[in-house]
Amino acid sequence: MRVAKTEEKAFRDILKLIMSQKYSPGDRIVEGDIASELNLSRTPVRNVLRQFVAMGVLEQIPRMGCCLPRLEPNDMRDVFRTRIYLEPQAAHIAAQNITDAQVRELEEMLAREREYFSKRQHDPYSEVNERFHMEIARISGNTYLARFIQHIYWRAALYTFFFDRFYRRRVDESKAPRDPESSNSCREHIGLVNALASRDPEKAREAMYCHVESTYNSLSTHRWAL
């Protein structure tokens, strides 16, 4: 149990380093440096770095460890196309399976998402977004679909962390509250939950498709300087 908790902490802490843009795309991630910075032993750090490689968040470098992938427009296109293939199907199935308790849980996630967005709390906002998408995949009941969605979600998250203005702390350091209604993602998530709650598979599929496509279109306006 202690090992699992240590690795979970390492997972979240390393993810925060990536989100904070401490490393740039193409930078080498050194196991020993990470362990020292996080005050952790090398074993959980090594295991988590392997997880990130398997998830596509990091890339393996032969005999040198791993690095943050270089972000390229063609890769982003393929990543989001894959999300568009997978996640609407999961939403379609989830609308047929979802219970009232699961609807309430998703609604609670949205309430926290809006709070974190308003307060510009990047880390918990990212976590609740991940949980929201993974919960819909889980509700589908298809473990293979959920596994593939988790993998591609984290690869897509790299583009979100670096290109979405919400995460670009060096650009936006204001402490003033932000209106969740100004967030396409917050609004689209509400529409998605409403579709799931209505048990309408086609509406849920369309809502998820439009959400992922909207995210891609928003990120595509980035000028490729990385």
Image (cartoon, rainbow, N blue to C red):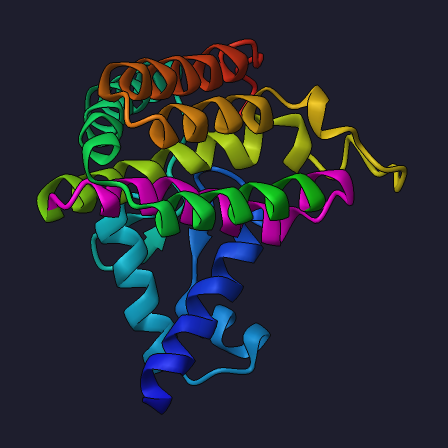
Residue 91, percent from left and from top: 26, 29
Residue 92, percent from left and from top: 21, 25
The magenta stretch is 116-142
Q: Nearer the viewer, residue 128 or 102?
A: 102
Residue 89, percent from left and from top: 19, 25
Question: Would you identify the image quadrant in which residue 1 lies?
Answer: bottom left
State whether residue 95 appears in this view.
yes
Q: Nearer the viewer, residue 179 or 107?
A: 107
Residue 63, percent from left and from top: 22, 59
Helix, strand or loop: magenta stretch: helix
Q: Relative to residue 72, is residue 125 drawn left or right?
A: right
| Residue at position x 49%, y 11% in the image | 220
Q: Is residue 11 above or below residue 61?
A: below
Farthest residue to the bottom: give it: 2
Q: Relative to residue 26, is residue 46 drawn left or right?
A: left
Q: Tell me how many marks there are.
A: 0
Q: Nearer the viewer, residue 29 or 14?
A: 14
Q: Is residue 57 above or below residue 159?
A: below
State whether residue 151 appears in this view.
no
Q: Is residue 72 above or below residue 145?
A: above
Magenta-span inclusion, residue 141: yes
Magenta-span inclusion, residue 28: no
| Residue at position x 51%, y 42% in the image | 107
Q: Relative to residue 123, is residue 83 drawn left or right?
A: left
| Residue at position x 38%, y 23% in the image | 195
| Residue at position x 28%, y 27% in the image | 199
